[in-house]
């Protein structure tokens, strides 16, 4: 080997000439050859290095944050404006009311100088038919969601989910006509049997509606349950399929059966989603108009608490009284009823959030 090659090799092996070890010749550690040097983030506005843990705020982020904040503020202002409008239009009619609006069962608004209107019967019928529909729809929706997420074969999941979702696309008036003309006659034997054999129980006692005619809360509640079924099912199914795979595989590895996997992992994980979907369905039921307008038979008799009562919900009563809307005072009576429904919806949503928060804790 020549002297030049020997000197070159010794320089390559000399740590001081390569900057090897803790520091190079200047005492500053150097990155290995071929590695990418990590540069600190810089704030484009100030030209200085960003503080550790603080990201750079870019124009797109500012725009998106402004749009999100503006949308939230707009929705809040819109809801507040609706509430203010309802109160503003309801006060003149309430000031002329000769009875207690919340406890009276009368509804006479023809003469604006002598008005007697109360929301008690309307509120009771609204809550009764909505809760009855929810009680019927929740177990069925839960069963469908469990089947689609845990038991259904792959080739059946998508078509069956589409069929259930299509129920939400059927117009309310079609449900009303089907319930009145097709379903009510078909369910009449069941209604008669319940009334004859369980009439001692208040829910199945003789009511203010006609069992033979089918215009009762019993018929309306079942139809309404079919209407809210797709809402509850869709939300519940979407939450159930998000169950962590690691939890499911861990349960299977411990020897759990398929039902035990559902009971110990899927149901606890998706409980809040199931409750949320149910509350969405209840909100839909509380505001339903056309189907109940067609099915329920109005009556002047007081609500008795039976499933075989007739009557009107708040929404269907407003639809029935559209002819009186040409007078602001008469329309104000119906707007006052709408205000009660508006508040009731808020109460339901607040209760749902409280239940969900309690389940998470």
Image (cartoon, grey):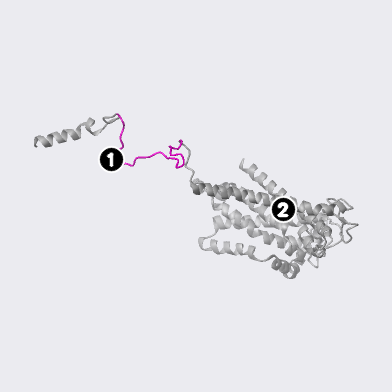
**Label 2 to label 1, Cα distance in Å?**
67 Å
Q: Main secondary structure of the magenta part?
A: loop
Query: Residue 248: x, y in percent?
Result: 51, 48
Q: In the depicted view, which residue is nearer to us: 325 or 153?
A: 325
Outermost residue to the right:
114
Q: Crowdedness of circle 1 by 10 Å Cα count: few (<14), some, many (20+)?
A: few
Residue 82 numbered mark, or none: 2
Query: In the rendered structure, which disc, 2 or 1, sits on the residue that comes first in sequence?
Result: 1
Q: In the depicted view, which residue is nearer to us: 63 or 87?
A: 63
User: What residue appears at the point 57 percent right and 52 percent down from the top-left corner?
Assistant: 240
Question: Residue 117, located in which quarter of the rendered image?
Answer: bottom right
Q: In the depicted view, which residue is nearer to us: 283 or 57?
A: 57
Question: Residue 43, located in which quarter of the rendered image?
Answer: top left
Q: In the depicted view, which residue is nearer to us: 99 or 179?
A: 99
The residue where tag 1 is placed is 33
Outermost residue to the bottom:
181
Quarter of the image that includes the N terminus: top left
Quarter of the image that includes the C terminus: top right
Q: Is residue 123 visible?
A: no
Query: Residue 17: x, y in percent?
Result: 22, 32
Range covered by the magenta-colored residues: 27-51
SS class of the residue under badge 2? helix
Q: Is 28 in the magenta?
A: yes
User: What residue appears at the point 29 percent right and 30 percent down from the top-left corner?
Assistant: 23
- Closer to viewer: mark 2 or mark 1: 2
Residue 160 in the figure: left or right of residue 341: left
Q: Is 273 in the magenta?
A: no
User: What residue appears at the point 69 percent right and 57 percent down from the top-left corner?
Assistant: 284
């Amino acid at each position: 080997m020549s002297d030049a090659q020997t000197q070159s090799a010794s320089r390559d092996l000399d740590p001081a000439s390569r900057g090897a070890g803790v520091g190079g010749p200047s005492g500053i550690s150097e990155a290995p050859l071929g590695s990418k040097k990590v540069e600190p983030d810089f704030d484009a506005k100030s030209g200085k290095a960003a503080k550790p843990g603080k990201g750079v705020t870019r124009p797109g982020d500012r725009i998106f944050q402004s749009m999100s904040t503006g949308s939230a503020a707009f929705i809040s202002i819109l809801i507040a404006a609706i509430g203010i409008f309802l109160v503003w239009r309801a006060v003149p009619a309430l000031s002329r009311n000769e009875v207690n609006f919340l406890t009276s069962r009368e509804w006479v608004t023809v003469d604006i100088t002598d008005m007697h209107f109360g929301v008690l019967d309307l509120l009771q019928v609204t809550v009764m038919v909505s809760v009855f529909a929810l009680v019927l729809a929740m177990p069925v929706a839960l069963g469908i969601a469990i089947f689609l997420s845990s038991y259904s074969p792959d080739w059946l999941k998508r078509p069956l989910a589409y069929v259930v979702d299509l129920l939400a696309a059927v117009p309310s008036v079609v449900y009303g006509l089907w319930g009145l003309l097709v379903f009510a006659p078909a369910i009449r034997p069941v209604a008669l049997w319940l009334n004859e054999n369980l009439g001692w129980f208040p829910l199945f006692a003789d009511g203010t509606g006609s069992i033979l005619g089918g215009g009762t809360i019993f018929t309306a509640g079942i139809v309404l349950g079919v209407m809210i079924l797709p809402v509850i099912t869709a939300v519940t199914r979407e939450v159930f399929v998000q169950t962590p795979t690691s939890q499911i595989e861990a349960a299977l590895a411990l020897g759990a059966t398929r039902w035990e996997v559902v009971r110990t992992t899927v149901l606890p994980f998706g409980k809040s989603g199931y409750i949320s979907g149910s509350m969405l369905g209840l909100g839909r039921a509380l505001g339903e108009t056309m189907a109940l307008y067609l099915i329920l038979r109005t009556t002047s008799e007081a609500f008795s608490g039976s499933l075989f009562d007739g009557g009107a919900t708040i929404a269907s009563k407003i639809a029935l009284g559209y002819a009186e809307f040409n007078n602001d005072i008469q329309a104000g009576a119906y707007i006052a009823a709408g205000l009660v429904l508006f508040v009731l919806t808020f109460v339901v949503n607040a209760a749902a959030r409280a239940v969900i928060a309690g389940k998470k804790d």
